[in-house]
Amino acid sequence: MGTPSDITKRAIYLAAVCGQTYAQFNNSDGSFVIPMDFSVTHTIQAKSILKVWEVFGFIIESPHEIIIAFRGTSSTTNWISDAIASQMKFKYIKEDCLTHRGFTHIYSSARDGIRSALTNLSPDKTLYITGHSLGAALATLCAIDLAANTAFSSPILYTFGSPRVGDPAFRNAFANYIHNSYRIANQFDIVTFAPPSIYKLPRREKKYYYSHVRALNPLSFQNGTIGLNHVISSYFDDLSQLEPEFTDRLCSNNPGFCPVN
């Protein structure tokens, strides 16, 4: 678990990792800044809702840790996926529960590659799973899947600006599998309120019910626009104020690693 200071420092570190998932996607050669002592072991490829293969993050490892990081929304096709908020059965656990159809399709397309990459890595290492925005939803699905179906039975999840991912049954199942989870959410970030707790498709009667997974670690910052209340650099900046000396060391030891607005 760690102390509150340890949790905050890890959140700052993983927020910077999430920032690099956007650099990876936006750079034509897929390059990004790899933190000290880590190396890349896998590039996550997934299909958007329009069946377009895209880079959705990476797996990196150090002598003692593994980090799986998912990026958030960076293209029109991802926004379409965000909007498909009907639900489907989450088939990777035995419990009967439902998850967001758009998020689940994207994660399912990446699943085989992630699981294959992990077979070459040691389950004795601490596994962190992280993501921002849409990437936070994918990280949540990945964490429960790996906990239920691989030797990595105790992943530690940190998400930033996550939307709701599944129904109340999924929330309850998640709590049974994932015992170290930190859902970091700015109370002024509208993405964290989507989909609504009760979602109804236009011109249809069926309703879908959504609940956030535990546990909430709230932040409170207003940066003037909807976008700036959500971007990973704003989360990084707000968290950094809690541990400024740690952040300064992190950024100076890893040039280009830390997000900037």
Image (cartoon, rainbow, N blue to C red):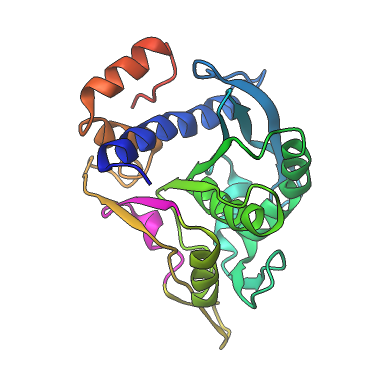
Q: Residue furthest bottom?
A: 205
Residue 174 appears at what percent x and percent y?
A: 53, 65
On whether residue 172 falls in the magenta region, the answer is no
**Residue 36 visible:** yes
Q: Residue at x 43, y 14 (%)?
A: 256
Residue 79 appears at what percent x and percent y?
A: 56, 51
Residue 221 appears at what percent x and percent y?
A: 21, 44
Q: In this figure, what is the number of numbered marks? A: 0
**Which range of residues does the magenta coloring cover?**
180-196
**Residue 70 visible:** no
| Residue 81 to residue 175: above or below | above
> Depth check: 138 or 29 in front?
138
From the viewer's perspective, is 225 left or right of 202?
left
> Depth check: 227 or 143 in front?
143
Which quadrant of the view contains residue 202? bottom right
Q: Residue at x 35, y 11 (%)?
A: 252
Residue 137 appears at what percent x and percent y?
A: 53, 54
Q: Residue furthest front?
A: 124
Q: Residue at x 70, y 33 (%)?
A: 121
Q: Quadrant of the C terminus?
A: top left
> Depth check: 205 or 64 in front?
64
On whether residue 181 falls in the magenta region, the answer is yes
Which quadrant of the view contains residue 31? top right
Which quadrant of the view contains residue 45? top right
Q: Residue at x 55, y 57 (%)?
A: 82
| Residue 198 to residue 133: above or below | below
| Residue 85 to residue 71: above or below | below
From the viewer's perspective, is 209 left or right of 149?
left
